[in-house]
């Protein structure tokens, strides 16, 4: 049985994303675009930034486990989903997964920053993904 790792919020990463969003808003209005396009670009940057900060502060998953390229996540609401990992990106600060839940037509993506897991759990998850999901 695969270990189930808890996923927490990432407040420092959320602050960094909020700063990047503010810079994006400044860039949207400090260029030569027509005013309507400036507002559109600014609103898109604001929406994406607010959504990202919200996901970092209150992630929609509470735990995850992976075994033999099978991912199992427990959502914050309590529902469990499982499916096959189709691609993984592993770096020292971030893990990104593309996976398709069972009985789902569309794939999903999942990103986890190092700050969201205990250091030893993040190291184990990264090592397991580098080995192709084998425990």
Image (tube, rainbow, N blue to C red):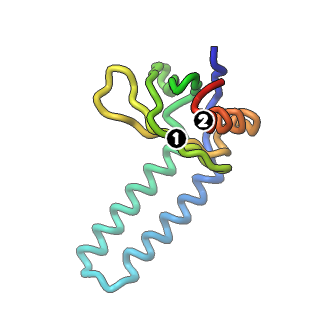
- The quadrant of the rendering that contains the C terminus is top right
Residue 19 image point, x, y percent: 55, 65
Residue at horizontal 64%, vertical 40%?
116
Which residue, given by chain and number where applicable, does mark 1 sit on?
88
Q: Is residue 57 above or below residue 6?
A: below
- At mark 1, the secondary structure is strand
Q: How many marks?
A: 2
**Image quadrant assignment for residue 3:** top right
Viewer-nearest residue: 62 or 128: 128
Q: Residue furthest bottom?
A: 32
**Residue 29 in the figure: left or right of residue 7:** left
- Residue 129, numbered label: 2
40 over 90 or under it: above or below: below
Lower sequence index among marks 2 and 1: 1
Toward the right, the furthest residue is: 120
Name the spot of residue 43 as percent of width and height, x first.
Answer: 33, 63
Whole-percent x, y for residue 100 in the image:
39, 30
- The residue at 60%/45% (across/down) is 90
- Check disc 2 and report its element: helix, strand or loop: helix
The span from disc 2 to disc 1 (Cα, nearest Å) is 7 Å
Crowding near the residue tagged with mark 2, few <14, some 14–19, many ≥20 C-alpha atoms within 10 Å: many
Q: Is residue 68 rendered to the left or right of residue 120?
A: left
Point 65% across, 38% down: residue: 126
Asked whether the residues under the numbered discs 2 and 1 touch, taking CB atoms below 8 Å apart as contact, a structural biologist would say: yes
Q: Which mark is residue 61?
A: none
Residue 74 image offset from top left, x and y in percent: 52, 23
Quadrant in the rendering for residue 128 = top right
Residue at figure coordinates x 37%, y 78% from the top left = 29
The quadrant of the image that shows the N terminus is top right
| Quarter holding residue 99 | top left
Q: Is residue 90 above or below residue 34?
A: above
- Along the line of sight, the residue nearer the viewer: 114 or 48: 114
């Amino acid at each position: 049985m695969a270990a189930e790792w808890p996923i927490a919020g990432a407040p420092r990463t959320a602050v960094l994303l909020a700063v990047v969003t503010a810079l994006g808003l400044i860039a949207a209005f400090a260029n030569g675009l027509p005013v309507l396009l400036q507002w559109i670009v600014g609103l898109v940057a604001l929406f994406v930034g607010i959504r990202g900060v919200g996901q970092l502060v209150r992630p929609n998953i509470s735990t995850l486990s992976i075994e033999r390229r099978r991912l199992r996540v427990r959502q914050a609401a309590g529902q469990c989903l499982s499916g096959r990992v189709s691609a993984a990106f592993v770096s020292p600060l971030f893990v990104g997964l593309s996976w398709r839940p069972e009985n789902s037509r569309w794939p999903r993506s999942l990103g986890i920053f190092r700050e969201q897991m205990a250091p030893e759990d993040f190291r184990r998850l990264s090592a397991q993904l580098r080995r192709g999901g084998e425990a």
